Amino acid sequence: MTERAQTSPRRRSLLGAAVLGTAALAPAGTAYAAGRGGGRGSGHGSYRDLPVPTVIGHRGACGYRPEHTLGSYRLALDMGAHIVEQDLVPTKDGHLVCRHENDITATTDVADHPEFEGRRTTKRVDGVTITGWFTEDFTLAELKTLRAKERIPATRQENTLYDGRWEIPTFEEVLRWADEEGRRRGAPVWLYAETKHPTYFRGLGLGLEERLARLLRRHNRHRAHSPLILQSFEPSSMRRMSELVATPRVVLLSGPAERPWDFVESGDPRTVADLVKPAGLRWIASFAQGIGPTLDLVIPRDGAGRLTTPTDLVRDAHARGLVLHPYTMRNENTFLPAEFRRGVDPGAYGDAFGALRTYFEAGIDGVFSDNPDTALLAASDAADD
């Protein structure tokens, strides 16, 4: 038995407790947490009617299944996640598929396909040099011959059990699945779709926004009260989407010193540190309804990895009518602030509930989580406080 395998009972017991504690197979949209000030409805209608804190299944329930597969999305929904996230990249023939990155080396079995050995190449994406296989070099038919696998097997060995079980879904397939699940469960299935590297793909003639807008209109998710939220690390992508559809939009924000890639390409000198100031938030509010900051922008960590004093970001964003959906909560020690780690195994579960409680107390409106069941239990705890 490996050291990682020895930690499995703890992981399984936490999952089991969460499933039992949240009645995880309840219909999507059920508000497990009443939320601050008595809560906000059950997820029907406006994004502002979603429960607070909103639990967003990050790439589905990728703490338990390979990310961006129908298996991961379905488990997130079964656990009770209020929203299920998709990241969108294009194929060579213009279809939008669900992958965290266009580099599919770590998330598919492409390396095991000798017929695609010649597709391995080196590219520069948003200033970063990457060697691997890329969605834009494959037709959809070719991608459908691949199967998904666990991205971080050293941390999530249990997830490798499901390697090869699911194919890469198109976003249109996910939209159909969400419509079917919504009818079956009697409540809308909320989706959270991200445009990945939009400037890069626009330069290849594979612009994401127009393709995405056509799909949203086709599936009647292009309205202000549609059960879908759009997101991007590039503000210009969300501004572009605001001209195409009325679907709510969120600007994602990374490290303070970083610049969105569309800013780099256009010569805009602003950094994320500028965008989280009142003037930057006011500008974002002119075309978006929310922000998705890193958790460190809400509560920074010190040099030892421990949480410090919350910033003014929650207060300032709320003052401009913006919701905050920070990313990403995970149960494993390696991802948690230092004071919430337990033991020395980086892949073992730490005190994720304690970390979530601290973030919820900072006033955030929701959180992206690889472990939706854990986040839902923490949200329920916050409602009881």
Image (tube, rainbow, N blue to C red):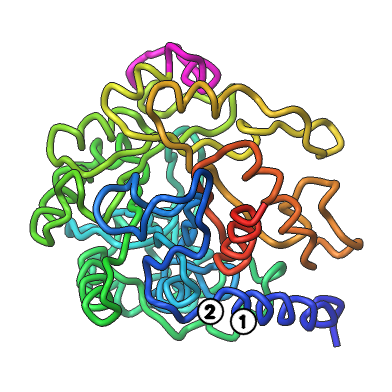
Would you say residue 96 is visible in this rendering? yes
| Dot 2: element | loop
**Residue shown at the point (73%, 62%) measured from the top left:** 332
Residue 20's tag is 1
Residue for point 77% across, 46% down: 337
Mark 2 lies on residue: 23
Location of residue 251 in the rendering, given as x and y in whole percent from the top left corner: 39, 34
Residue 283 location in percent, x, y?
A: 34, 17
Image height of 31 relative to 183, above or below:
above
Q: Which mark is residue 88?
A: none
Question: Do the CB atoms of the residues marked 2 and 1 lie less than 8 Å apart?
Answer: yes
Q: Residue at x 46, y 48 (%)?
A: 122
> Above or below — where is 184 with respect to 332?
below
Residue at 85% across / 81% down in the picture? Answer: 6
Region in magenta: 265-280
What is the CA distance from the residue labelled 2 to the residue labelled 1? Answer: 5 Å
Q: Nearer the viewer, residue 67 or 17?
A: 17
Quadrant placement of the N terminus = bottom right
Instruction: Answer whether residue 267 is magenta in the image.
Output: yes
